[in-house]
Amino acid sequence: MKNHITSAEAKGFRRRWKAVNAAEREELINTPIMHKLLQLAALMASAEQMGWTGALAAEEAEVRDRWNRLRKVLGD
């Protein structure tokens, strides 16, 4: 197995990922807001079913604390 790729392979890889990103962007632009909200609701429900809400709440508190420290330092 080779450990490196050629310049042409790298360019092809980058070109393909740019095409994937463009297609994804287009799909997101064309997705109705109601569908996006339903997807979000499904994700939130699955987090609750998996018992992640406690861990997420703890992380949320930690993030809020970081933001508050930044605001204090920056004077906002």
Image (cartoon, helix red, strand yellow):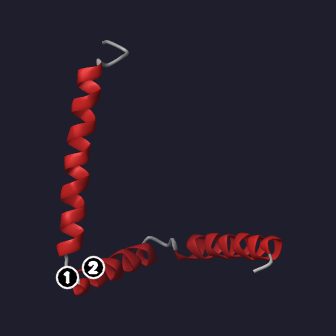
Identity, as a three-letter code, of the amino acid under mark 2:
Lys
51 vs 24, left or right, is right
Mark 1: which secondary structure?
loop
Residue 32 is tagged as 1
Query: In the picture, residue 65 is in which quadrant?
Result: bottom right
Could you give the CA–CA distance between mark 1 and mark 2, rounded to whole angstroms? 7 Å
Picture residue at 25% right of the left edge, 63% below the top: 25
Point out which mark residue 2 bears.
none
Left or right position of 60 against 35:
right
Residue 73 location, x and y as percent? Answer: 82, 70
Number of marks in picture:
2
Query: How many residues crowd around disc 2 within 10 Å: few (fewer than 14), some, or many (20 or more)?
Result: few
Would you say 24 lies left or right of 66 here?
Answer: left
Dot 1 and dot 2 residues touching (CB under 8 Å)? yes
Residue under pointer 2: 36
Question: What type is the residue that disc 1 sits on?
Answer: Pro
* Residue closest to the eye, 12 or 38: 12
- What residue is at 31 percent from the left and 19 percent from the top? 5
In this rendering, the answer to whether 26 lies above or below 1 is below
Position of residue 17 relative to residue 21, above or below, is above
